[in-house]
């Protein structure tokens, strides 16, 4: 199978989406404006393919073919027109996403998606010339391990676009849910609620982070506790989502002061080496992180 798939933003999510799309046979262009981020993403993708070979999940020839299907770009202007799919995975800020989506739409993709965790699709579609081709394609972290694709249908999304997104999920090996366009959709609204309350519990001194997480893993069978999950997602990402949900639903989503302080201090979780846990080379200092089961 062929086709051209463009991903904008080579952060945590963008590189994961690019990895999965290359594995599904797409020629992938991964657009990243920050050169050091682009280099880090290329290195990480190399590690992922090497690891897949070492674990017997891909043979060396498949991994090499997937690698060859991926090209890094420094700007959307370097991408040829009329790709099959464009997915933006830039930071969770509506103004930035609208700018990127406007540039992406100028390429006339058949399907245009946003990986937003919480911003309404209607808000992101403002200013688009063809909002009927646009919808939310909310992947989960780590993209190669998480089966869910939340397909968020905006008020202007055409039924054929939703059908195309569901078909895309199948090609990428994902299991879709189709949801209505409300801030936080069906996933982040619940998941972030739990994460924010866990942070308030740390601030209240209810228990140590590891014990709050253990309580949810052993007591409620969650695959990973809410604080470790916050570290995996990124505290900055969760803070942005909390602010979006606060604006939509009120102060029940107000970010706890501890979260704001930690982000200001550069404690962003796994990606910075420090969050509710200490991380070295992507692993929790007191034991291997699952790295699975995260979302935003
Ligand atoms: P991130 O900060 O790790 O990565 C974003 C990347 O976008 C950065 O590398 C940045 O340099 C790049 N960027 C910024 N402006 C750009 C532009 N104009 N063109 C190209 N690249 C640009 O963020 P992330 O965690 O990957 O999150 C991205 C999106 O995915 C957000 O909307 C977030 O809410 C959503 N999301 C995150 C998770 C998660 O677990 N982290 C899960 C699901 C969805």
Image (tube, grey):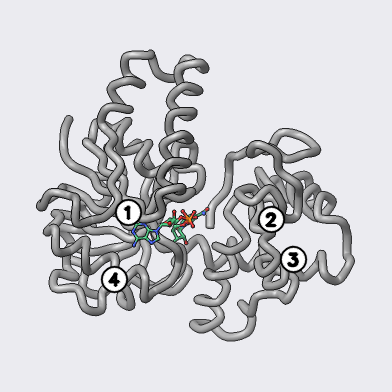
| Mark 3 sits near ligand 1, with its Cβ under 8 Å away | no
Image position, residue 229 (x, y; %) = 64, 52
Q: CA distance from mark 3 to mark 2?
A: 9 Å
**Nearer-the-camera pick, 70 or 237:** 70
Q: CA distance from mark 4 to mark 3?
A: 33 Å
Instruction: Pick whichever of labels 4 and 3 is earlier in the sequence.
Output: 4
The residue labelled by disc 4 is: 99
Q: CA distance from mark 1 to mark 3?
A: 31 Å
Q: Closer to the camera: disc 4 or disc 3?
A: 4
The residue labelled by disc 3 is: 199
The residue labelled by disc 2 is: 226
Q: Residues within 10 Å of mark 3 (few under 14, many from 20)?
A: many
Image position, residue 295 (x, y; %) = 54, 52
The residue labelled by disc 1 is: 8
Residue extending farthest to the front is 35
Instruction: Pick whichever of labels 2 and 4 is earlier in the sequence.
Output: 4
- What secondary structure is marked by label 1? strand
Q: CA distance from mark 2 to mark 4?
A: 32 Å
Indicate which quadrant contains ligand 1: bottom left
**Nearer-the-camera pick, 233 or 181:** 233
């Amino acid at each position: 199978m062929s086709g051209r798939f463009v991903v904008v933003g080579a952060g945590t999510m963008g590189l994961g989406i690019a990895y999965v799309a290359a594995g599904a046979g797409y020629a992938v262009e991964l657009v990243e404006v920050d050169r050091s981020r682009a280099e880090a993403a290329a290195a990480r993708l190399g590690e992922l393919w090497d690891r897949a070979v070492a674990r017997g999940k891909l043979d060396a020839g498949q991994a090499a073919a997937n690698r060859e299907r991926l090209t890094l770009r420094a700007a959307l202007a370097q991408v040829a027109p009329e790709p099959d799919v464009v997915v933006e995975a830039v930071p969770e800020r509506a103004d930035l996403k609208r700018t990127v989506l406007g540039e992406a739409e100028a390429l006339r993709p058949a399907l245009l998606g946003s990986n937003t965790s919480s911003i309404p699709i209607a808000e992101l579609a403002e200013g688009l010339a063809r909002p009927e081709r646009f919808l939310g394609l909310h992947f989960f972290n780590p993209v190669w391990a998480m089966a869910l694709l939340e397909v968020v249908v905006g008020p202007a999304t055409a039924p054929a676009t939703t059908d195309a997104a569901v078909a895309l999920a199948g090609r990428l090996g994902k299991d879709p849910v189709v949801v209505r366009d409300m801030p936080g959709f069906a996933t982040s609204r619940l998941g972030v609620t739990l994460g924010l309350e866990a942070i308030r519990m740390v601030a209240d001194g209810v228990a140590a982070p590891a014990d709050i997480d253990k309580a949810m893993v052993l007591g409620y069978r969650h695959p990973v506790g809410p604080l470790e999950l916050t570290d995996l997602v990124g505290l900055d990402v969760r803070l942005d989502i909390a602010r979006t949900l606060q604006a939509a639903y009120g102060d029940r989503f107000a970010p706890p002061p501890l979260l704001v302080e930690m982000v200001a201090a550069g404690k962003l979780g796994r990606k910075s080496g420090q969050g509710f846990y200490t991380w070295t080379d992507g692993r929790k200092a007191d034991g291997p992180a699952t790295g699975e089961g995260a979302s935003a």
